[in-house]
Amino acid sequence: MATILEDTSRTFSEYLLIPRLTRKGQRADLVDLGTPLGSFAKQKTGRLKLNIPVVSACMQAVSGTQLSIALARQGGLGFIFCSQPIETQVEMVRQVKSHKAGFVQSDSNVQMNTTLAEVTELMNRTGHSTVPVTDDGTATGKLQGIITDKDFWEFEDDLQRTVGEHMTPYSDVIHGNEGISLREANELLHQHKKDCLPIVNNKGCLIALVFKKDYVDHQRHPMELLDESKRLCVGAAINTHDYKERVPALLEAGADALCFDSSDGFTEYQMEGTQWIRENFGEKIIIGGGNVVSAEGFDYLVEVAGVDFIKVGIGGGSICITREQKGVGRGQASALLEVAARRDAYFEKTGIYIPICSDGGLANDTQVVIALAMGADFVMMGRYFAMTNESPTPKTTINGQMYKPYWGEGTLRAQNWQRYDDGMSTRKMVFEEGVDAFVPLVGPLADVLDTTLYKLRSSMVNIGSDSLLEFRDRAVLTLVSEQSVVEGGTSSVFQFTSNREYEDKNWSGTG
Ligand code: MZP
């Protein structure tokens, strides 16, 4: 006979935090939002630590290049979706990695005999205004000079002339030598008032470029999530079907973490996939598993499969209809509480910490706060990011309001059949588990995230905590009745829908 769990499936909106003592000097801006992404052993720090506890969903309408760049610059991580050909996903990863910061490999290079017309076309296409000139036209060829858009006038000079006639020759190029630190490279840029510094090895071959704009940019984004080479970090989703081809290509492109994209990850497919990656690429690779909603699922993916972090959540996503379609899932709060308790017990037993991610169904900032208080190390969101300027979908006007399309990976539109593996591999979807919808446009990612994180910091101060770990250790939550939810809203006051309406009515507020 089936087992019936005694607890009811609970959701985040059914809980409230009880304030704890706030100590003098605790301030929202001093709170540390750093959190581990990969598993780690006691006494050792996480392999990759997020600067804020937020990652973006592995979805077509969410995690493209621009969004992943914008999120990494705020300290979080984008997981580029895998419901696309390997080549295009790899290209997206590459674009994030080469976006900026520190030593970057030059991806626009020419030779001395390249014409000005050709270099103009290259500059227009890539948006790069500084182009190295190498003997073989590659990023690692012998450096012969630098050509910038200031070295010739597109509408005045004869564009059939060659780069060699207009470039700054190598003898005059201010450059750094292999082994130079980023700080020293920036000092050279500063001292010589240059925008770009090529770095060469002892054979005179180009190895990297350092840009002034990256330095300036980093000062403006102190929380940026960067790898050891000061490149932005990016995650990549994978599936249990083509990982033998997809994973090597993604790692080669520089993906910092992988994550299985599956509605139900409690499967032998995920175990086999994880073990294959471990056998071929070792323990260093950060692999996320899931999704699961039970301690049993956690045990399997951690102990048998060997993943690094676990995504929790089935059926709670804003565009998800899995629970209605298949009767499978669990209230997100109940699932998270059970898995968090198992993570803590596992840490106690083995000394190995496995971060967990609350994935899907976070309908507002409060629920992000509650998820982290309940023990999530970080949250994954789709709808939240789909609403921002940086999501990969076009802005659309409906009845005078700006929207963006947002669809589930379980829709016919996404065609992500690999996510819903039922072992049949028929390569077609018999029914949908997601919907195709629109969400209101809310503006730049940095602005909305700033508000969300400020609320989180503020709640953490209410609980008297300086870090996320302390937050969940000190958190005391209470279940709320329907009536107390009503009580928590405004009551017995009349609100205008906008200031405009208020002014139009010419009520000064004093009468
Ligand atoms: P949300 O932040 O929009 O509420 O939920 C995003 C999450 O929903 C994703 O990270 C993923 O786990 C899940 N998802 C994506 N597509 C579907 C679907 O089509 C889905 N059913 O459930």
Image (cartoon, helix red, strand yellow):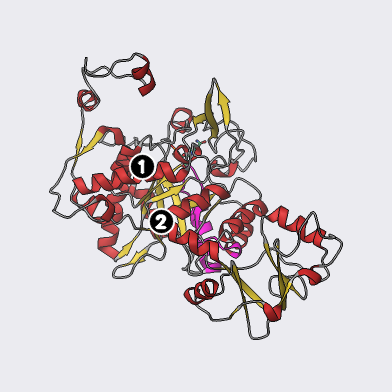
Please determine whether, in this image, residue 283 is positioned above or below residue 74: below
The structure residue drawn at horizontal position 30% and vertical position 40%, both measured from the top left corner, is 334
Residue placed furthest toward the front: 156
Relative image position of residue 20 (x, y in whole percent): 14, 46
For the residue pair 259 and 290, the one nearer the viewer reads as 259
Residue depth check, mark 2 versus mark 1: number of the one nearer the observer: 1
Can residue 421 be seen at all in this image of the molecule?
A: no
Q: Which residues are magenta?
A: 252-281
Q: Regarding mark 1 in the picture, which secondary structure is present there?
A: helix
Front residue (pair 39, 101): 101
Q: Position of residue 183 (x, y in %)?
A: 47, 74
Residue on which disc 1 sits:
451
Q: In the displayed structure, would residue 28 be above or below residue 402?
A: below
Foreground of the two, 299 or 408: 408
Q: Residue furthest bottom?
A: 202
Q: Which residue is at 53% across, 28% downward? A: 402
Q: Is residue 352 visible?
A: yes
In this rendering, position of residue 436 left or right of residue 348: right
The question of residue 480 being in magenta is answered with: no
Q: Which mark is residue 309?
A: 2
Q: Is residue 230 above or below residue 220?
A: below
Disc 2 secondary structure class = strand
| Mark 2 CB near ligand 1 (8 Å cut) | no
The location of residue 411, given as percent across then percent down, is 57, 33
- Nearest the eye: 256 or 365: 365
> What residue sits 53% from the left and 57% below the top?
273
Where residue 483 sits, quadrant-wise, is top left
Q: Residues within 10 Å of mark 2 (few under 14, many from 20)?
A: many
User: Mark 1 or mark 2, which is nearer the start of the sequence?
Assistant: 2
Q: Position of residue 340 (x, y in %)?
A: 30, 50
Does the stretch in magenta take in 264? yes
